[in-house]
Amino acid sequence: MNTPKEVINNINQIALNKGNYKKSKTLILAILAGAYVAFGALLAIIVAGGSPGIAENNPGLAKFIFGATFPIGLILVVVVGAELFTGNNAYFIPNLLRKKQPIYHMFKNWAIVYSGNFIGALFLAYIITHLTHIVHSEPYINSVYSIAEGKTSHTFLVTFIKGIGANWLVCLAIWQGVASENTAGKILAIWLPVMAFVAIGFEHSIANMYFIPLAIFEGADITWTTFFIKNLIPATLGNIVGGVLFVGLPYGHLFNKKHHK
């Protein structure tokens, strides 16, 4: 296990590498990450959404099962390598604090990765899930509708704050994954915080690129405008704040070589 200072050094190098990727490489890795997160979301729907009896009698256990099955996407992103917008919200900040990397690198990465994540999530939602009728029958369809309706029913502020909570934990999960030196350690280090944010009910913009479009494809009474205005925009902004303000800035300040004593 690496120390926090060693983790920051690793994060700094990873960010430099990400900033120098060709746009095509970044886009392909981003599409893969969107698909990976969507696989986790689909698994959660199948396992937890397919257990309505548990949800009715023990809602806390149902939320735990949903959270426990979701993290495969984030595990794949770290272990096999991919570009995830939410994780990248924190990666670049320590280097920016030390002026070791141009801010252009960060914004270029965010724009390409966000777009690619959306493509990957939509591919899983429409091609892999909708066209195969995996969630078309009961009880899965009820779960699909319920998740999407819940995610589009809050105020902008509530979804924004839930977005902060989600990416605070997601970025910590990814940095713990970087800190771990073997695959089993990485899996456990990533699984715990991701399970927590999902079970709690926070809002992850990339996961929502799958959950809500899937419900729309399956006939839910939700419009694309509602999806963007009521969920994706506030969740994305919250995710950025969670990653930048609560992970990248404090750890970049405390453990960068320049500040660390």
Image (cartoon, rainbow, N blue to C red):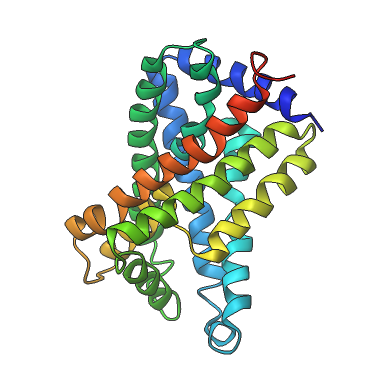
Q: Is residue 210 left or right of residue 202?
A: left
Task: Judge whether 12 appears above or below 210 on screen.
Answer: above
Location of residue 133 in the rendering, given as x and y in whole percent from the top left corner: 38, 66
Location of residue 39 in the rendering, given as x and y in whole percent from the top left corner: 51, 52
Between 207 and 219, the one lying in front of the other is: 207
- For image coordinates 39% across by 49% down, the residue present is 205
Q: How many marks?
A: 0
Task: Judge whether 136 appears above or below 114 on screen.
Answer: below
Location of residue 124 in the rendering, given as x and y in whole percent from the top left corner: 40, 50
Let me know if residue 39 appears in the view: yes
- For image coordinates 56% across by 57% down, the residue present is 197
- For image coordinates 55% across by 72% down, the residue present is 48
Of the 4 image quadrants, the one containing the N terminus is top right
Task: Judge whether 242 appears above or below 17 on screen.
Answer: below
Location of residue 58 in the rendering, given as x and y in whole percent from the top left corner: 61, 84
Between 102 and 214, the one lying in front of the other is: 102
Let me know if residue 82 appears in the view: no
Task: Judge whether 259 appears above or below 132 on screen.
Answer: above
Q: Is residue 175 left or right of residue 228?
A: right
Q: Is residue 228 left or right of residue 87?
A: left
- For image coordinates 75% across by 19% down, the residue present is 261
Q: Can you tell which quarter of the image residue 156 is in? A: bottom left
Between 253 and 11, the one lying in front of the other is: 253
Q: Is residue 115 left or right of residue 21?
A: left
